[in-house]
Amino acid sequence: MRVSLRLAAIALGLAVSACADSGADESAAADPSPDFATQLDAPAPDYAAMLAGETLPDRVENTSIKASAPPPPDAAQIGEVWRSRLDARDALGGLGYSGNGPGNGAVRLLDTLLSREDFNAMVRENGWTVPRHIDFNFVERLSYPAVADEVANRIRYWPQRRQRTGAQNMAALYGKVYLKDGCLFVDGLDGKTSLAWFLAETGLDLDEEGYFILIDRRTGWTMGRLGETMSWAGPNGEPTAEETASLRASCGDYPVADVGNPHSEVRFEAELERARQDRR
């Protein structure tokens, strides 16, 4: 679900082999090379014009299956089977019970961290029958790659959570997100520099003017240019110890900070203005 972060508050770890711009911090794990990219600052694009041209992808995608039958006598057992199936795949976002909860009722709702497409594929591969008495909710599918082909060899590591995003903490966090010597960094409001860590729905691409941009992988929309001040909901999506070690091996022994799905502050202001215009 796409949210305006401030209104809400008012990895994958793709290691790439290649070679980066000079000027890397002395603590970086690899020597600087002119093939890795640096983008410390960038002018904001014309977000007003961009917003005017944005439309949702031309596709019909269900994000839920609604219950269509009453619970059978073995509803409690069926619900626990499906809960464990999703849990085993790290794809359980949440669940709801009839009655007063586990032990006193049956599962009546399962929030998954799968798209409807991936859920259907899982069901087909295993020969399962979807119970008709449970509501299933799905996340939107990712229609764009985590890293566009033309930029994959310009970064050392794409720091991203594998699991899709379910319920989030919604504190409004801010900072400057930028690219230096092939690594993604964030400077927080406290002036502290950390390696950035993204949620699954954010991707990396180039825009028509040649700037590195963060996109929403569900829609392809530009959420900000690297080097802009951005905001995000958090804290969410901290990397595992193994992911942190892998990221630091590529980019240096810095702290690692969750930056969620960052959203340019300039874009946010353009969205507010568009909303004002639409209300007139």
Image (spheres, helix red, strand yellow):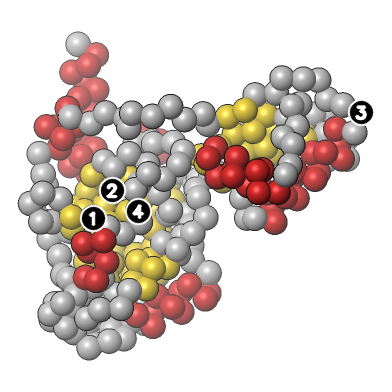
Q: Would you name the residue on which mark 3 appears? A: 73
Q: Position of residue 271 (x, y in %)?
A: 23, 31
In primary-sequence order, the first of circles 4 and 2 is: 4
Q: Which residue is mark 2?
A: 215
Q: Residue 127's quadrant in the figure?
A: top right
Q: Earlier in the sequence, mark 2 or mark 1?
A: 1
At mark 4, the secondary structure is loop
- Is residue 6 visible from the viewing direction of this image? no
x%, y% of residue 212?
Answer: 18, 58
Q: Are marks 4 and 2 in contact (CB under 8 Å)?
A: no
The residue identified by callout 4 is 145
Q: Which amino acid type corresponds to the residue marked 4 in the rendered image?
A: Pro
CB under 8 Å between discs 2 and 1: yes
- Decide which of 130, 208 is in the foreground and name it: 130
Residue that label 1 marks: 205
Report if the CB atoms under discs 3 and 2 are less than 8 Å apart: no
The kind of residue tagged 2 is Ile
Name the residue at 92% across, 28% down.
73
